[in-house]
Amino acid sequence: MYPLIEIKTVPIEIEMKVSHAKLEYARGTADLEISRDKGGLSIKSRPIKLNIDTFEARNSVVPTAMRSQEQAAQKGQEASYTATATYARHGDMLLNAKIGEDTIQQFAVESTMKNYKPNVGIQFLPSVPPEITWDPGEMHIRYEMDKLNFDWRVNQPQMEFTPGDIEISVTQQPDVIIKYVGGPLYVPPSADPNYEGAVDVEA
């Protein structure tokens, strides 16, 4: 006898995919902005300044009304001082006069000599030179180089986290396969072409 039934089992098949967790560093970006400030060259110069004051020189030639009054007043004051001194001296001479001395003649000679001024006809005009002053010249040079301005704009770095993942999939379901491996069954058994019935043995 041999088995008529063959039983076969099919196991389950499972596929598992695992993704590990990741922590990634995302680099920050940086922007650069460049601006330029232009310099320049500037030169400022001031030439020599000559100052000529001719006020006194003109007054020595043609005095102004105020200066004429001042000069006249000064001359009058000097004349009064001179006359006072002369009268005092004459009085002193008269007090000390001796008999027979010609005092009056001395007065006349003194007055004549005092008022005598030789006139040669030469006079320099103007009698006062002009006043000359000067301011020195100046030169200012200013040079400024160009400037470059760098403006950095840096974004903050970021961390990106990817969580882990487990994926389970069933690629083959479990199964039981039952297979009949025997021959056909005939009812009645005698219908089997290969049937071999019982043989009677006679004694």
Image (spheres, helix red, strand yellow):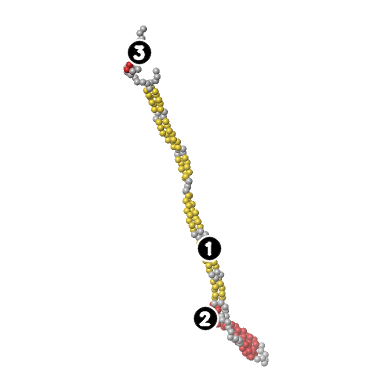
Task: Locate the C terminus by quadrant.
Answer: top left
Q: Mark 1 or mark 2: which comes first in sequence? A: 2
- Separation of marks 3 and 1 at Cα, in angstroms: 141 Å
**Residue for point 63% across, 86% down:** 89
Quick check: can you spot residue 87?
no
At label 1, which amino acid type do we have? Answer: Arg
Q: Mark 2 or mark 3: which comes first in sequence? A: 2
Q: Which mark, residue 175?
A: none
Instruction: Look at the picture and state if 101 lies above or below 125.
Output: below
52 displayed left or right of 9: right
- Separation of marks 2 and 3 at Cα, in angstroms: 188 Å
Tell me the quarter of the picture where residue 140 sits.
bottom right
At label 3, which amino acid type do we have? Answer: Ala
Q: Which mark, residue 198?
A: 3
Q: Are marks 1 and 2 in contact (CB under 8 Å)?
A: no
- Separation of marks 1 and 2 at Cα, in angstroms: 52 Å
114 displayed left or right of 190: right
- Whole-percent x and y of residue 28? 47, 47
Instruction: Look at the picture and state if 106 lies above or below 15.
Output: below
Instruction: Describe the element under mark 3 as helix, strand or loop.
Output: loop
Q: Which mark, residue 142?
A: 1
**Looking at the image, is mark 2 or mark 3 nearer the viewer?**
3
**Looking at the image, is mark 3 or mark 1 nearer the viewer?**
3
Disc 3 residue crowd, few under 14, some 14–19, many 20+, Cα 10 Å:
few
**Residue for point 65% across, 91% down:** 102
Quick check: can you spot residue 138?
yes
At label 2, which amino acid type do we have? Answer: Ala
In this figure, which residue is indicated by the disc labeled 2? 65
Q: Name, please, the residue furthest toward the bottom.
A: 100
